[in-house]
């Protein structure tokens, strides 16, 4: 091979190595974000259940009406 082709091939291999490294880093970030989203979704569901339970227990059968000035 000529020197120009070898230099070009070397540069392509370097660029590929950087791209693979970047993809691996991004994949780790995406996996971590997926775990965080799952955790937050579970927490939100639990909190929603707690708020609904509190609303039911505060004044059973009580309807929230508009104030008299409406």
Image (tube, rainbow, N blue to C red):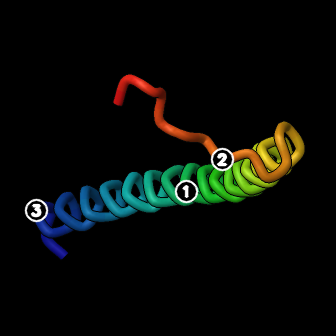
Q: Marks 3 and 2, how far apart in space?
A: 81 Å
Q: Which residue is mark 1?
A: 30
Q: Which mark is residue 1?
A: none
Task: Look at 66% across and 47% down and name the residue there.
Answer: 63
Residue at label 3? 4
Q: Position of residue 25 (x, y in %)?
A: 53, 50
SS label for mark 1: helix
Mark closer to the observer (2, 1):
2
Q: Secondary structure at mark 3?
A: helix
Who is closer to the viewer here, 9 or 44?
A: 44
Q: Depth check: 23 or 31 in front?
A: 31
First in sequence, mark 1 or 3: give its number.
Answer: 3
Look at 73% across and 50% down and name the residue there: 48
Residue wearing tag 2:
63
In which quarter of the view is residue 8 placed?
A: bottom left
**Relative to 60, 69 lies left or right:** left
The answer to whether residue 34 is visible is yes
| Residue at 10% over, 62% down | 4
* Whole-number angstrom distance, CA of label 1 to CA of label 3: 39 Å
Q: Position of residue 53 (x, y in %)?
A: 85, 50
Would residue 1 be found to the left or right of residue 53 on screen? left
């Amino acid at each position: 091979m000529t020197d120009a082709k070898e230099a070009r091939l070397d540069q392509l291999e370097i660029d590929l190595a950087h791209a693979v490294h970047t993809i691996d880093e991004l994949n780790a970030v995406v996996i971590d974000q997926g775990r965080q989203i799952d955790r937050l979704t579970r927490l939100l569901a639990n909190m929603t259940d707690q708020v609904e339970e509190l609303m039911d227990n505060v004044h059973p059968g009580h309807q929230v009406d508009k104030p008299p000035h409406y």
